[in-house]
Amino acid sequence: MKIGIVGAGNIGATLARKLVASGHAVKISSTKSPDDLRELANEVGATPVHAFEAVKDVDVVVASIPYGRNPELAGLFSGLPADTVIIDTSNYYPVRDGNIPEVDSGKPESVWSSEQFGRPVIKAFNAILADVISNGGKPYGAPGRLAIPVAGDNAAAKAVAMQLVDDIGFDPVDSGTLGESWRQQPGSPAYCTSLKAPELREALSETDKARSPLNLAALMGQLSAGWPTTEVMTAWNRELSARA
């Protein structure tokens, strides 16, 4: 597939590397110029471009920028064909993004993102850490293969995203509609806890919508001191999920 990635941070760059290794043609962009991105792009095997070029003539666009900046992409997708799949990987971190009243009041994060983009989106690659994406993938059917949740309203678009999850070495788990994507947001048992498919399905089904914001607030308190290692972040999320 032809894939454009908007955002070259931890998730965007890691996905670029893994998708190229899986045989996909990838363009990558960020706030930096293509020349400034060239070293990273050469390293991962992608083509560095401006954001407006990243979304042209592709099958899939991956939006992977800090959540609070999603409104900046409002005009970027306006001319895309209707069947272009747009994947939102972002997560709402109030400590970084500032407070967004609609999301604080319970609107699912990717519903809000979709409204900012003016396009339907698929929620994927948000509930897994970049280091796990980079190092945790396994071939299909391998014992202990980890899973990634995928939410969305369009069955065909969701199937494309789930195929990409499988391509990079993880079991895709259908987590429901975009309106149900709160089940994989920060603060939920499915968020960055590195689960296998049966465990992930159970975590998604057991998510308490009222409790997740409390877990998110606790997580933000921990993150205010800085971003931890993969092991510590995973342990924090598992601990939050286990609390009564």
Image (spheres, rainbow, N blue to C red):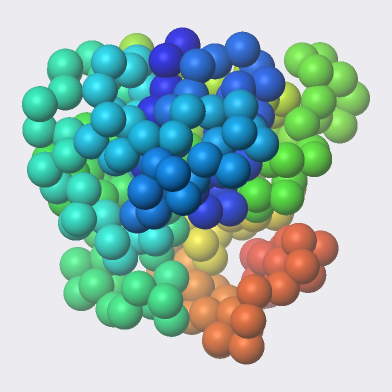
* Residue in front for this viewpoint, 91 or 7: 7
Judge left or right: residue 149 versus residue 160.
right
Judge left or right: residue 164 versus residue 243.
left
Report if residue 172 is visible in the image: no
Report if residue 237 is visible in the image: yes
* Residue in front for this viewpoint, 208 or 172: 172
Q: Residue at x 30, y 65 (%)?
A: 68
Residue 94, image quadrant: bottom left
Residue 17, image quadrant: top right
* Residue in front for this viewpoint, 131 or 231: 131
Q: Residue at x 81, y 25 (%)?
A: 138
- Asked if residue 134 is positioned above or below residue 244 in the image, the reply reads above
Judge left or right: residue 128 versus residue 35.
right
Residue 191 in the image, given as x and y percentages of width and height? 59, 54
Residue 189, image quadrant: bottom right
- Asked if residue 168 is positioned above or below residue 216 in the image, the reply reads above
> Residue extending furthest front?
35
Residue 7 in the image, given as x and y percentages of width and height? 42, 47
Q: Residue at x 65, y 52 (%)?
A: 129
- Asked if residue 84 is positioned above or below residue 17 in the image, the reply reads above
Judge left or right: residue 44 versus residue 62.
right
The total number of labels drawn is 0
> Residue extending furthest right?
143
* Residue in front for this viewpoint, 44 or 165: 44
Quarter of the image where the C terminus is located: bottom right
